[in-house]
Image: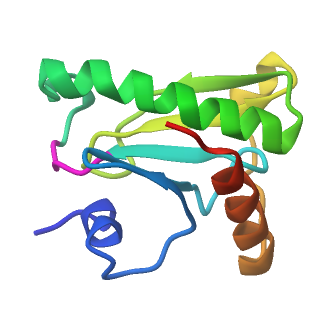
Amino acid sequence: MKSIFSKIIDREIPAHIVAEDDHFIAFLDINPLSVGHTLIVPKKEVDYFFDVDDFLMAEIMVFSKSVAAAIKKSTGCRRVGVAVIGFEVPHAHLHLVPMNGMSDINFANPKLKLSQDELATMAKKIAGQFAV
């Protein structure tokens, strides 16, 4: 059975996509820790992040670097944090979280409740700053 991320990749369910190339897709987390919280997902479905092949492992960081720069420009945050959790969806992915302090990337924090319009506006803003 396909993961929810594979369904997003295949456009079977909607997402607020900010960037995409042949190997990865980046879209906003619908339960973000902060505005601009983005997921980077390999298009090849692999459950555990460290089972991703070496080529994709290296390339995900290069792709993430460009997306993080776009997030930083779009949100005005001090830093973009990176986290690999991997329990919530059985498809490897990175979290890129806009941060102004250490506590901003604490996954025990309450998640933001953003409207679809707020998510769409932020996705457009980040996508407009993205450059590979």
Query: What secondary structure is the stretch in magenta mostly built from?
Result: loop
Most extreme residue toward the front is 131
Residue 25 drawn above or below residue 103 = below
Residue 37 drawn above or below residue 79 = below
**Which residue is rendered at x = 29% and y = 18% of the image?**
58
Q: Is residue 87 left or right of residue 43?
A: right
What is the x, y in percent for residue 56? 22, 28
Examine the structure image and report whether residue 44 is included in the region drawn in magenta. Answer: yes
**Which residue is rendered at x = 42% and y = 23% of the image?**
62
Tally of numbered tags: 0
Q: Is residue 74 left or right of residue 5?
A: right
User: Quadrant of residue 125 in the image?
Assistant: bottom right
What is the x, y in percent for residue 32? 67, 52
Which quadrant holds the N terminus? bottom left
**Which residue is rendered at x = 32% and y = 61% of the image?**
5
Q: Is residue 119 left or right of residue 50?
A: right
**Which residue is rendered at x = 26% and y = 30% of the image?**
49
What is the x, y in percent for residue 115? 77, 76
Bounds of the magenta segment: 42-46
What is the x, y in percent for residue 21? 35, 49
Colour convention: rainbow
* Between 62 and 101, the one nearer to me in the picture: 62
Examine the structure image and report whether residue 32 is included in the region drawn in magenta. Answer: no
